[in-house]
Amino acid sequence: MKHMLSIAAVSLLLGAGTAVAQQSSTMHDAHLDQVDQNDDGAVTQGEYQTFMTSAFSRLDANGDGQLDQNEASAVLSSSQFGSTDANGDGNVSQQEFMSQVMRDFQTADRSGDGQLR
Ligand SMILES: [Ca+2]
Ligand SMILES: [Ca+2]
Ligand SMILES: [Ca+2]
């Protein structure tokens, strides 16, 4: 899970975070809550995808559909940026971003039921 995007960081970025101190690298209930739109205690792939799509738009400050390293720096370390930038053009496109975060979802979903809880 070391390449996992920090949901904590993304949540904070979206302005939903209340506890700045909780910069845990593991997914914490408080952060999952913000992704869990229907509050059923589980984050489905769809909820995660919606959350991350909106995170991408917020990160993309200049709205060109790509994250440069500066835009991504709030949630990606430079080594994470490098591994997310699949075609190595120095920008993370929405497709690259989503394919990375959906891989992260599958990694985190150890039980393989398509839900994080
Ligand atoms: Ca849910
Ligand atoms: Ca951009
Ligand atoms: Ca790229």
Image (cartoon, rainbow, N blue to C red):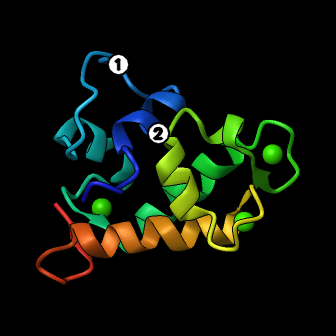
In terms of sequence position, does the residue under pointer 1 or pointer 2 come before the other?
2
* Foreground residue among 83 and 114: 83
> How far across and how far down the image is residue 34, in percent?
36, 42
Label 1 sits on residue: 18
Q: Is residue 64 above or below residue 9?
A: below
Which numbered tag is attached to residue 105?
none
Could you tell me residue 17's position as x and y percent?
39, 25
> Where does residue 13 sit, x and y in percent of width and height?
53, 30
Give the residue type that dot 1 points to: Thr
User: Label 1 to label 2, Cα distance in Å?
Assistant: 12 Å
Q: Which amino acid, by three-letter code, is at mark 2? A: Val
| Horizontal arrangement in the rendering, residue 5 relative to residue 73 (left or right) | left
In this view, 80 is above or below 72: below
Q: Which quadrant of the structure image shows residue 107? A: bottom left
Locate residue 6, reporting x and y percent.
Answer: 37, 44
Image quadrant occupied by the C terminus:
bottom left
* Residue at (51% x, 25% y) in the render: 15
Q: Which residue is mark 2?
A: 10
Q: Residue at x 22, y 58 (%)?
A: 40
Q: Which quadrant holds the N terminus?
A: bottom left
Task: Examine the rendered structure and indicate whether residue 66 appears above or below residue 74.
Answer: below
